[in-house]
Image: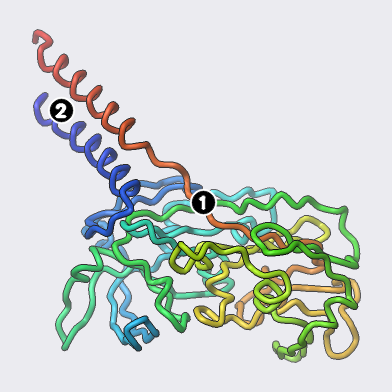
Amino acid sequence: MKTIAVHHVLRAAICHALFGLSIGAHAASQTTQFLLDGQVNRGGSYVLSDLQTLPAATQTVSFQTGKGPQTHTFIGTSLWNVLDTAGIQNNAAVKNDVLNKYVLATGSDGYKAVYSLGELSPNFGNEKALIAYAEVVNGATVSLGADGFARTTAPLDLKGGRYVSNLSRLTVQGSASTQASSGGGVSTSFSVTGDVMQSLSFNLAALQALPQISRTVGSDTFTGVSLWGLLSNATGLATDPAVKNDVLGMYVVATGSDGYKALFSLGELSPDFGGQPDLIAFDRNGTGLGSNGFARIIAANDVKAGRWVSNLTSLEVFHAVSAPVPEPSIAVLMLAGVVLLAGRRLKLPR
């Protein structure tokens, strides 16, 4: 029994050491597990059998790749349900705190893609992203092969940049926003800061000078400017050309005058990927926005209006970050310590 206990401890220590090595190496490798961590109550490692015990869904998707269009039928489990079941850590004192969070999916080669929790939640964006672990090919269910034991999907995206293969980590984080409440009330301008080429401020006249679009939601027609267009064209996005699809590792946080916040992944906004028609509205049915300020975010396709940030005062753009993992050298030292302690335990007299 003592030998079995020691083997169990050693196995856990080795897994943590190898995980740190695999993330640090930035070399593509076929995965057999991924780690869920960050702002969840019940994180940990998931292997194939763990995913197979969860409710399964079949999803047929088509998307563009560098090699041309692809269509796949994946079998997997809901990404949102995995996160929700793990217990997303929300501040009960903050209204819709979940809308100010994201999950960062990382592959074994270090490739990263952000999903906002707002786009994943069935109450809001309802993006039915999966953690896929099998595929149907010619009527037969097969593994994902070189794409690892699991990969994410993004069924609303036009291109496959957020289909993270060889999934090795999912990290749930709150945004890095530092914008505080300005005391509430009707806003007259908003700023754009963070990972942009130039920080700018917009009032009504500046907003109206940009290309205008309209969206009809229910019985209301909103006129304004494209949220994506303002970020990508007016301020510009500070992306790293050395990082593949760097924009997919970024997000923007909209803050209202009362401090209310909502987060959008740039992947869901980009016309190359999610293409969501979200806008910064300054007019509703030709009469302005009244008590909702001079500008308001309209998430036109969301089920509920939780991400419709009124009295907009700030847009902050960030690159997503994940919690650090142990450096390989530290992991090896930890493993050595476990081995030493285990050896001493075995030598103790009965």
How far separated are the C-alphas under marks 2 and 1? Answer: 35 Å
Check the image and name the residue furthest to the top. Answer: 349
Q: Which of the two residues, 129 or 236, is positioned nearer the viewer here?
A: 236
Location of mark 2 (residue):
6
Quadrant for residue 201, please give it. bottom right
Q: Label 2 sits on what residue type?
A: Val
What crowding class fits label 2: few (fewer than 14 Cα within 10 Å), some (14-19), or many (20 or more)?
some
Residue 105, percent from left and from top? 42, 60
Question: Is the Cβ of the residue at disc 2 closer than 8 Å to that at disc 1?
Answer: no
In this image, 180 relative to 227: left or right?
Answer: right
Quadrant where the N terminus sits is top left
Quadrant for residue 254, please give it. bottom right
Residue 240, percent from left and from top? 53, 62
In this image, 283 relative to 162: left or right?
Answer: right
Residue 178, percent from left and from top? 71, 49
> Residue at the location (65% across, 76% down)?
228
Residue 224, above or below 111: below
Give whichever of discs 2 and 1 has the lower sequence position.
2
Q: Which of the two residues, 86 or 325, is positioned nearer the viewer here?
A: 325
Q: Label 1 sits on what residue type?
A: Val
